[in-house]
Amino acid sequence: MLNLDTHILIHALQGSLTAKERQLLSADTWSISGIVLWEISKLVQLGRVEMDLADRDVVRTLSKIHTWPLTLEICLGIHDLDFSSDPADEIIASTSIVHRVPLVTRDGKIRKSKLVPLAK
């Protein structure tokens, strides 16, 4: 199982993954932190991402992805991160650590972390 950050999921839904990302995602099941759904909704609301979240294909795809809930363990794990970022990215990274699920991300700060398990 892989944990996808917000932008990787958006690229997957919009068909704009890199070849390496496509290969990586096609070889495993997907999961996301619950905060990813909120972040996508906000990006759509703010006009920064064009996506119809009510579209049947989008809803069907999102419903098949395992969603990790926000837990106290994940929130406490944020305190131990070896980088500082926006709250959503910290929650996503902590989710990967707590559940020992490799994260797929393009985020440079997260990719430099020695703690977050990264998909390769």
Image (spheres, grey):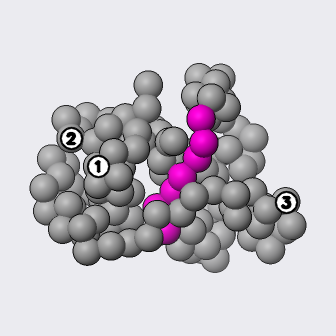
- Tell me, yes or no, whether the highlighted magenta stretch contains residue 60: no
Q: In which quadrant of the rendered image does the C terminus lie?
A: top left
How far is disc 2 from disc 1 in space, using C-alphas?
A: 7 Å
Graded by Cα atoms within 10 Å as few (under 14), some (14 to 19) or many (20 or more), the crowding at tag 3 reads: few
In the picture, measured across the screen, residue 82 lies left or right of residue 32, that is left
- Tell me, yes or no, whether the highlighted magenta stretch contains residue 31: yes
Q: Position of residue 110 (x, y in %)?
A: 31, 43
For badge 1, the amino acid type reads Ile
Residue topped by disc 3: 57
Can I make out residue 36 in this image?
no
How far is disc 3 from disc 1 in space, using C-alphas?
A: 30 Å
In the picture, measured across the screen, residue 119 lies left or right of residue 43, that is left
> At x 24% / y 67%, what residue is drawn?
73
First of labels 2, 1 by sequence position: 1
In the picture, measured across the screen, residue 81 lies left or right of residue 58, that is left
> At x 19% / y 35%, what residue is drawn?
114
Closer to the eye: label 3 or 1? 1
Residue bounds of the magenta highlight = 28-34
**Are the residues flagged by discs 2 and 1 in contact, CB closer than 8 Å?**
yes
Q: Position of residue 108 (x, y in %)?
A: 34, 38
For badge 3, the amino acid type reads Asp
Graded by Cα atoms within 10 Å as few (under 14), some (14 to 19) or many (20 or more), the crowding at tag 1 reads: many
Q: Position of residue 40 (x, y in %)?
A: 59, 66
Residue topped by disc 2: 115
How far is disc 2 from disc 3 in space, using C-alphas?
A: 35 Å
> At x 85% / y 60%, what residue is drawn?
57
Name the one closer to the observer, 69 or 90.
69
Graded by Cα atoms within 10 Å as few (under 14), some (14 to 19) or many (20 or more), the crowding at tag 2 reads: some
Residue topped by disc 1: 97
When asked about the image quadrant of residue 75, the answer is bottom left
